[in-house]
Image (tube, rainbow, N blue to C red):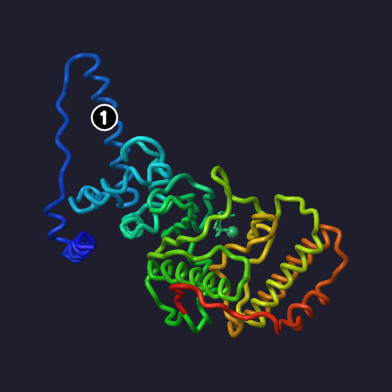
């Protein structure tokens, strides 16, 4: 862990020091041969591209600093599967720009140092709020890594799910903190749901905007969404999901708030519910509204699959289902 301390020390040092240590590109030498001209042209194009990118996002200066250079060298080969082949200068800079900012690389670095992640292998999904990657841990086991984007626009939409949840008080926070809170919220919700024995991916690790959880899928692809599969026994699946919502509400005191066949994966012959970042506790002012919406989505799916039910019936079940047999279990290393 000595190295990690070293990183912490270095990151704590002041900015002017960092500036002084910044390295500048060597000026390009001109060359009179044709090949040389091509090279010069190619390089100037690349310089132009990179300086544009930097001017646009103010982004990459930090990568020239020694400490980050070293960190990046350490993990560059391990995130290759996620960013594309080749060295940093040649990979898909747009994905890089969107996902791997400085703090994210730091988080990955820490999770890699801890063995929670060894390699990021390939992207599973590229969403508005997060990228999800197939990854491998130090023991060779597969995990899913959800990396939340830290750009501003995304989180305006999410604030409503944080306000009113007393576990995450303090409204006026810096944007970056909001992202981190959001990820912690998803992690804690996963932990709470898993503790009640519900079918969700097991939470495995978290660092700032990076969430590591159990991977649902095969070696080559993630499990399909419930939306994409035709199930043989919709009655059983419906009962299962109704019970999921009932346990959430009555026992775990949570409402998923984005329950839909898009956020349920079909894994090992049954449904597993994902994407629980927006789930709120019962006392949230909109909890009941969200619950009705969740149950509505489930009823819509059921009706589409030939099941005779109504919103009123399903709501009654969720609120009154007898759950005396359901008990919570302790999870190792849980947060709450
Ligand atoms: N634990 C997981 N295992 C496998 N695939 C996952 C996992 N979590 C998410 N995914 C994939 O990533 C996609 C996006 O994840 P989700 O949590 O729904 O984020 P978003 O907020 O972008 O909707 C999912 O639709 C699914 O395909
Ligand atoms: Mg989703």
Write the residue at 14% across / 60% down.
16
Q: Is 148 above or below relative to 280?
A: above
Looking at the image, residue 93 sits to the left or right of residue 336; the answer is left
Residue for point 53% across, 68% down: 277
Instruction: Determine which residue is flagged by label 1.
Output: 43
**Residue nearer the viewer, 113 or 82:** 113
Ligand 1, seen in the image, is in the quarter at: bottom right
**Where residue 56 sits: x, y (%)?**
34, 48
Where residue 21 appears, as percent x and y from the top left, is 12, 52
Looking at the image, residue 4 lies above or below residue 23: below
Q: Is the residue indicated by label 1 positioned so its CB lies within 8 Å of ligand 1?
A: no
Residue at left offset 44%, top offset 79%: 171
**Residue 311: % across, % down:** 81, 73
Looking at the image, the residue that sits furthest to the top is 33
Q: Is residue 48 above or below residue 12?
A: above
Q: Residue at x 51, y 69 (%)?
A: 186
Asked if 3 appears above or below 69 in the picture, the reply is: below
For disc 1, the neighbor class at 10 Å (few under 14, some 14 to 19, many from 20) is few
Left/right of residue 321 with respect to residue 144 in the rendered view: right
Query: Considering depth in this image, is 103 or 118 the residue closer to the camera?
Result: 118
Tally the numbered discs.
Answer: 1
Residue 300 lies in quadrant: bottom right
Secondary structure beneath label 1: helix
* Picture quadrant where residue 170 is located: bottom left
Of residue 156 and residue 227, the one placed in the foreground of this image is: 227
Of residues 28 and 194, the one nearer the viewer is 194
Residue 159 shown left or right of residue 118 in the figure: right
Q: Position of residue 78 (x, y in %)?
A: 35, 46
Please identify the residue farthest to the front as the structure is shown: 139
**On-image quarter of the N terminus:** bottom left
């Amino acid at each position: 862990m000595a190295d990690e301390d070293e990183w912490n020390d270095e990151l704590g040092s002041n900015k002017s020091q960092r500036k002084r240590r910044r390295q500048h590109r060597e000026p390009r030498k001109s060359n009179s041969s044709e090949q040389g001209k091509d090279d010069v042209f190619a390089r100037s194009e690349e310089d132009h591209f990179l300086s544009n990118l930097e001017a646009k996002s103010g982004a990459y200066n930090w990568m020239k600093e020694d400490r980050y250079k070293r960190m990046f060298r350490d993990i560059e080969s391990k995130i290759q599967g996620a960013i594309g082949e080749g060295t940093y200068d040649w990979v898909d800079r747009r994905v890089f720009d969107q996902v791997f900012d400085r703090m994210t690389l730091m988080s990955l670095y820490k999770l890699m140092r801890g063995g929670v992640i060894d390699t990021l292998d390939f992207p599973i999904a590229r969403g508005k709020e997060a990228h999800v990657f197939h990854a491998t841990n130090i023991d060779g086991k597969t995990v899913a890594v959800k990396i939340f984007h830290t750009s501003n626009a995304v989180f305006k939409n999410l604030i409503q799910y944080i306000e009113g949840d007393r576990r995450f008080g303090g409204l006026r926070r810096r944007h970056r903190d909001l992202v981190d809170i959001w990820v912690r919220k998803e992690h804690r919700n996963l932990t709470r749901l898993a503790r009640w024995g519900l079918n969700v991916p097991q939470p495995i690790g978290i660092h700032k905007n990076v969430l590591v959880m159990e991977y649902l899928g095969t070696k080559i692809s993630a499990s399909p969404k419930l939306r994409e599969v035709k199930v043989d026994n919709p009655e059983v699946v419906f009962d299962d999901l109704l019970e999921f919502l009932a346990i959430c509400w009555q026992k775990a005191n949570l409402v998923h708030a984005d329950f839909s066949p898009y956020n349920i994966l079909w894994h090992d012959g049954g449904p597993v519910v994902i994407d629980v970042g927006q789930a709120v506790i019962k006392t949230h002012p909109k909890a009941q509204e969200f619950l009705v919406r969740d149950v509505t989505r489930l009823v819509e799916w059921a009706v589409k699959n030939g099941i005779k039910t109504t919103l009123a019936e399903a709501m009654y079940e969720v609120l009154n289902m007898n759950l005396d047999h359901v008990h919570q279990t302790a999870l190792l290393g849980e947060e709450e």
